[in-house]
Image (spheres, helix red, strand yellow):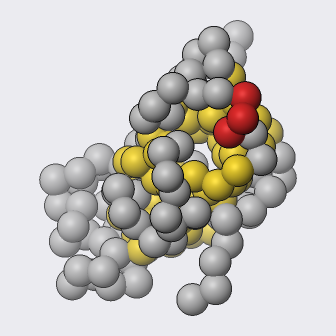
Amino acid sequence: MTVYKPYGYRYGPHEIKMCYIDTTACAATTINTGDMLSVSTTAGAGYLLPAEVGCDYVVGVACETKAPGATTIMVDSSPHAVYEYPANSTVTIAMKDTHADVAGAREVDVTSPTDKNLYIVDVDTANQTVFVRIVKQAA
């Protein structure tokens, strides 16, 4: 029996890559399977950490859980894979086929997107979740 997780991968092709974790920024942070990941801008610039509000670029989604101190992680960076996450506001059908922002490693900001690093392909108004794809952006 498969356990349904309230967020994370739902369907589509994977592009799995081994990436480095920003061990300075994540010294006390566990990265969980399904967390959206972004590029660090601190001392570990270029390495990954859990996405936060205002991050400009989502690199991918963690494929495994890593405890603090881990140095590498498997990441799904496919722009075609679809993930489900809760929204930070009321979800409506009108949000389908629009852009959104990251509201945290496991939450989508559906109110007035500025970074537009996620694309909403479908919505679940009953559970107040959105199905998103990562928008690949030029550096």
Q: Is residue 121 left or right of residue 55?
A: right
Instruction: Name the residue rendered at 49%, 64% in the picture.
Output: 114
Percent of width and height locating residue 127? 59, 16
Residue 19 in sight in this render: yes
Q: Nearer the viewer, residue 41 or 94?
A: 94
Q: Is residue 64 above or below residue 38?
A: above
Instruction: Name the residue rendered at 51%, 26% in the picture.
Output: 90
On-image quarter of the N terminus: top right
Percent of width and height locating residue 59? 55, 68
Q: Is residue 52 above or below residue 124?
A: below
Q: Nearer the viewer, residue 17 or 100?
A: 100
Instruction: Name the residue rendered at 40%, 66% in the picture.
Output: 55
Q: Nearer the viewer, residue 13 or 87?
A: 87
Q: Is residue 113 left or right of residue 123?
A: left
Percent of width and height locating residue 133? 70, 52
Percent of width and height locating residue 92? 65, 27
